Amino acid sequence: MASSTSTSGPDIHLYTTQTPNGIKISITLEELGLPYTVHKIDISKNTQKEPWFLEINPNGRIPALTDRFTDGETIRLFESGSIQQYLVERYDTEHRISYPRGTREYWEVNNWLFFLNAGVGPMQGQANHFNRYAPERIEYGVNRYVNETRRLYGVLNTQLEKSTSGYLVGDRCTIADIAHWGWVTGAFWSGVNIDEFPALKAWDERMLQRPGVEKGRHVPDPHRMKELSKDPAKMKEHAEKSRAWVQQGMKADATKK
Ligand SMILES: N[C@@H](CCC(=O)N[C@@H](CS)C(=O)NCC(=O)O)C(=O)O
């Protein structure tokens, strides 16, 4: 994971933490075999809101990435979908996890990438919030977001049932599969039972067999979702810790202009 020391070519820096959105990027980088330097951002201490970080991502969220652009200057990227598209457009010249621009499969990957970034991610994120981080249990909120996540999982399951390769689009694993994986593998955390979706469950396990997924999921810290799902005491502890900083962050955001 060491970055290049030359003055031309890539110089990728990933600003991240151990979350579904963060590991999309480390998995993408590992699948492409690209060298990169990891900067761990402690979101529980609001490092993502510090002025230097806002210069990279004005939205104050991880993941963010910088690289040496083709003009030799630094390019700053944020929004996980945008970062994934940048990485494959610039570096996946052999189309290992993407398709050539303009092909039918290219656009189909785009469909699923937007489906994740505008659907599964936000809905499941809110399911996590109401299920794990809210100070009180509000059944309406829990049901609204868990049911919507379940509905989206049903759409994914149907797509995978039809797939002959076992991946969302065409004959290979793409950035669309990678974008979904961190979320789907944490279904239990959001209150969704993955056993209801056999094709999606098989895909989750298939993805986990990929060396790039195995390596990238542990960036910047070990990925413990599978272990967590089997240990109710650890789940409680993890929820309590996260609840504290989520609530603190919300208060700070509410008073900011
Ligand atoms: N749409 C954004 C979502 C990014 C996001 O919500 N990141 C979370 C971690 S998964 C974060 O940085 N949270 C810190 C905060 O809320 O201040 C993306 O896809 O990159």
Image (cartoon, rainbow, N blue to C red):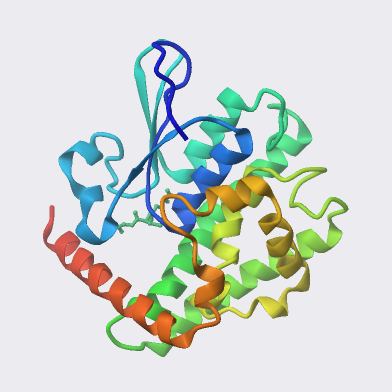
From this view, report whether residue 143 is shown above or below residue 221: below
In the visual, does 100 lie left or right of 110? right
Viewer-proximal residue among 162 and 24: 24
Residue that sits furthest to the right in the current view: 164
From this view, report whether residue 89 is shown above or below residue 124: above
Q: Quadrant of residue 156?
A: bottom right
**Residue shown at 62% from the left, 39% from the top:** 31
From this view, report whether residue 151 is shown above or below residue 77: below
Image location of residue 171, percent across then percent down: 82, 43
Viewer-proximal residue among 216 and 161: 216
Residue 112 visible in the shown view: no
Image location of residue 27, percent across then percent down: 56, 46
**Residue shown at 11% from the left, 61% from the top:** 255
**Image-quarter location of ligand 1:** bottom left
**Residue shown at 43% from the left, 18% from the top:** 69
Viewer-proximal residue among 156 and 186: 186
In the visual, does 230 lie left or right of 197? left
Image location of residue 112, percent across then percent down: 65, 50
Q: How many marks?
A: 0
Residue 225 visible in the shown view: yes
In the visual, does 50 lie left or right of 65? left
Image location of residue 237, percent across then percent down: 35, 81
Q: Quadrant of residue 3?
A: top left
